[in-house]
Image (cartoon, grey):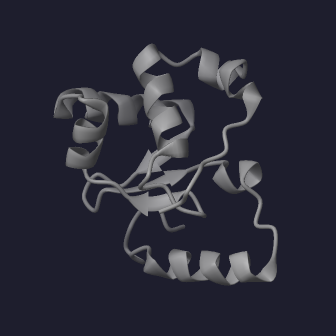
Amino acid sequence: MRDYGKVQSTFWTSNNTRSLSDDGRMLALYLLTGNHTNQIGCFRLPDGYVCEDLSWTKERVLKGFVELFNNGFATRDMDSKWVFIHKYLKWNIIENPNQAKSAVRLFDQVPNESIVKP
């Protein structure tokens, strides 16, 4: 868990974000700033967490993830519930060797069989 999350101001004006529905934008913003997000933008996020945090139904959550996948924003392993935000490290650069060591440890926690790891 992080104390804060970065969101580029261009999030709101990028063509990818503008093409999302309101739910798609909300879920994308939640993934970038939520308390389950980590330093590498790849983390386990069960449906129940999203349902509780956003007060959404499971169907709404699943529809949001499909939209973010189709838009190229994120990939989610529906079996293991791991999420990977595609340009996360471009927007949240690792700034020093200690952060790099931490990032490697986080990467090692991602299951090798998950579709988000490659």
> How far across and down, in percent of the image, does residue 46 sit?
26, 53
What's the residue at 39%, 75% (across, down)? 111
Which of 59/102 is in front?
A: 102
Q: Is residue 37 above or below residue 47?
A: below
Residue displayed at 62% across by 15% down: 18
Image location of residue 79, percent across then percent down: 24, 58
Q: Image point 50% across, 82% down: which residue? A: 108
For this rendering, which residue is in front, 6 or 63?
6
From the image, which quarter does the C terminus lie in? bottom right
**Left or right: 98 with respect to 46?**
right
**In the displayed structure, would residue 67 be above or below residue 106?**
above
- Farthest residue, direction right: 96
Between 25 and 74, the one lying in front of the other is 25
- x and y percent of residue 117 in the render? 50, 68
Residue at x-position 29% and y-position 41%: 50
Measured from the top left, where is residue 77 in percent x and y?
35, 55
Quarter occupied by residue 60: top left
In the rendered view, tell whether residue 65 sits above or below residue 39.
Answer: above
